[in-house]
Amino acid sequence: MANNYFKFKEFTIQQEKAALKTTTDSCLFGAWVAHQLQTTIKKPSTILDIGTGTGLLMLMLAQKLNVLIDGIEIDQSSYEQTKENIEASPWKERLNLFCGDVKTFSFEKQYDFIIANPPFYEGDLKSVHLHKNIAKHDAELTLEALAEATAKNLSAEGCFALLLPYHRAEAFMAVAEKKDLYLSQLVRVKQTFKHRYFRAMLLFSRTPKTLTEDEIIIRNADDKYSTKFTDLLKDYYLYL
């Protein structure tokens, strides 16, 4: 049985109410995005997390960046869970959460940076639990709708990052380009050297740029975390 909480160095994610629990790839994604925002991207004034779940990505970014971060979550129980996690964090004054559907929600501003870990596994076997379907599948948010919502709410000079199953990345690139969102960074992720790629971390900008590509392997042959993974997660994971 999965733990009802996941403790990091500076915050804790309670997750008993949430449709999806904390995963290694979502932690990697949050740490990678935080690193990009500190090193290669102009620091944003405002950030939006679409489909915030437990608030994991909001809190990971808040730990590294002194900026205002909003989140939106359609699932009521996940929304309530995120509210609790935000209130228990050191950064609650900079974090704001909405319960609603990003496809129809009217935000008061556009955002310099948008992050999303969107619904997975279009067309795959679905759960009998509706809230898990919404969280894991595109029953409520297709890739096309995500691209449209992002383009609508992203500022003219803004950037957008998301985590996808590797086999869906190429399809989203085509969808995004129709909304004038251009891929600037692509990181392919695999569990070990022996595994195939299973996740893609993508960064988009409003204007075309030279594409930068990279690879992260989570565990070495000795089953220890790789250097790249450790460097990104050492400020978050308790035992790194």
Image (tube, helix red, strand yellow):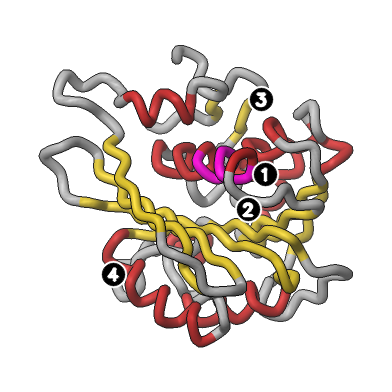
Reading the image, the residue beneath label 4 is 124
* SS at circle 1: helix
Q: Residue 164: percent from the left, percent from the top?
A: 40, 60
**Which residue reaches farthest front?**
210
| The quarter of the displayed image where residue 81 is located | top right
Comparing labels 3 and 4, the label whose residue is closer to the camera: 3
Real-space CA distance between mark 1 and mark 2, rounded to the nearest whole angstrom = 7 Å
Q: Is residue 88 left or right of residue 230?
A: right
Mark number, residue 52: 2
Q: Residue at x 46, y 68 (%)?
A: 183
Q: Residue 100: percent from the left, percent from the top?
A: 73, 67
- State yes or no: discs 3 and 4 in contact (Cβ < 8 Å): no
- What crowding class fits label 2: few (fewer than 14 Cα within 10 Å), some (14-19), or many (20 or more)? many
Tag 4: amino acid = Asp
Q: Residue 211: percent from the left, percent from the top?
A: 41, 63
In magenta stretch: residue 197: no
- Point out the stretch of residues depicted in magenta: 32-37
Comparing labels 1 and 4, the label whose residue is closer to the camera: 1
Reading the image, the residue beneath label 1 is 58
Tag 1: amino acid = Met
- State yes or no: discs 1 and 2 in contact (Cβ < 8 Å): yes
Reading the image, the residue beneath label 3 is 11
Tag 3: amino acid = Phe
* SS at circle 3: loop
Q: Is residue 129 visible?
A: no
Q: Is residue 100 visible?
A: yes
